[in-house]
Image (cartoon, rainbow, N blue to C red):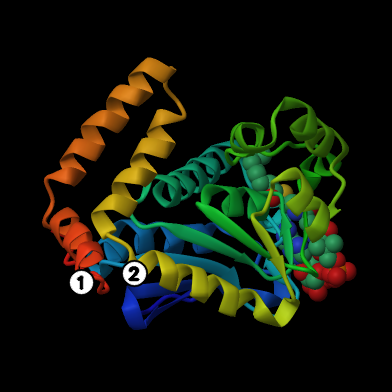
Amino acid sequence: MGFKYIQFQKEPNNIGVLTVNRPNVLNALNWDTLGEFKVFLEDILPGEELKALIVTGAGEKAFVAGADIAQMNEMKERDFQEYVDTAHRVYELIENGSCPSIAAINGYALGGGCELALACDIRIASEKARLGFPEVKLGIFPGWGGTQRVTRVLGLGKTKELVFTGEMIDANEALRIGLVEKVVPHDEVMKEARDLAGEIAKRGPIAVRMSKTAINAGSEMDLQKALLLEKTLVSLCFDSEDRVEGMNAFLEKREPLFTGR
Ligand code: CO8
């Protein structure tokens, strides 16, 4: 596919695996990696018609250890702005893309790496994973959506504790506070992510897509508007061929064959 720092693999059942591939620097996100991510998400992903996308890191040690500190340190103000803009765009494309995304956290998820995991819909962590936001130790703070997405997941107090101290937490603590949804043995992370992706892939794709929109967009609205959005989307869903198929399959005691129409 011509990418140097990311790898994309399309697997059976329209499940995709996107791997950040800079294991020598614990998959730190340099400018080119983010650029490749952006091209993939804007130009390639829409044509793949995936039912789920798994995001992970190459090697045994890291999901993504954050932004590339060496490169950031050399950046001038204008480049830095563009670097931040690109990361924001990439994370928004993942968060709001029609395809459900699963972060398979196979090691360190730090700073921009933890922010990447939070842009995904669901997070599965290896028991060896370590998560956190060490940015304040570098004189910056989590500026790739971190202060906002973490707050929405963890609430104000826990977010401030993690962001102000920059301390890492282990996978079980991440599970306890709701930063990840599941912790599994290290060598089962990808299997667990694939199993979950497989479950999602079996469901009505329109229903999955619209529920993601209702949850994401609705969570940013007041309740009345969010309920109106929900009502509109579920009515659209009701009009789909997949709804007819899903209900008929239930009544006929068979598995549904969804077509995405
Ligand atoms: N950037 C660049 N290189 C890195 C990074 C990184 N984030 N993380 C690790 N590396 C490199 C190391 O420099 C080392 O390279 P080399 O072999 O050439 O010395 C190699 O990866 C292996 O790392 P270590 O030898 O350090 O491995 P250890 O097992 O000893 O330690 C750690 C692992 C604890 C993960 C350690 O590498 C570490 O602390 N890394 C930095 C983590 C970090 O601070 N991440 C946050 C980065 S800042 C960020 O993400 C900001 C995002 C938002 C920006 C918004 C605008 C402000």
Residue 64 placement, left or right of 116: right
Figure check: 51 above or below 244: below
The residue identified by callout 1 is 257
Sort mark 2 into few (<14), some (14-19) or many (20+) by Cα contacts within 10 Å: some
The residue identified by callout 2 is 202
**Residue, x 27% and y 73% (percent of image)?**
255
Figure check: 131 above or below 44: above
- First in sequence, mark 1 or 2: give its number: 2
Q: Nearer the viewer, residue 14 or 10?
A: 14
Q: Please indicate, yes or no, whether residue 19 appears anywhere in the rendered image.
A: no
The spot of residue 44 in percent (x, y) is 29, 66
Sort mark 1 into few (<14), some (14-19) or many (20+) by Cα contacts within 10 Å: few
Which quarter of the figure is the N terminus placed in? Answer: bottom left
Q: Nearer the viewer, residue 123 or 33?
A: 123
Q: Amino acid at mark 2?
A: Lys
Figure check: 181 above or below 152: below
The spot of residue 99 in percent (x, y) is 35, 57
Q: Amino acid at mark 1?
A: Leu
Which quarter of the figure is the C terminus placed in? Answer: bottom left
Q: Are marks 1 and 2 in contact (CB under 8 Å)?
A: no
Q: Please indicate, yes or no, whether residue 78 appears anywhere in the rendered image.
A: yes
Query: Tag 2, which secondary structure?
Result: helix
**Residue, x 31% and y 32% (percent of image)?**
230
Residue 100 placement, left or right of 24: left
Figure check: 42 above or below 8: above
Mark sitting on residue 229: none
Disc 2 beta carbon < 8 A from ligand 1?
A: no
**Residue, x 29% and y 28% (percent of image)?**
229
Label 1 to label 2: alpha-carbon separation: 9 Å
Query: Tag 1, which secondary structure?
Result: loop
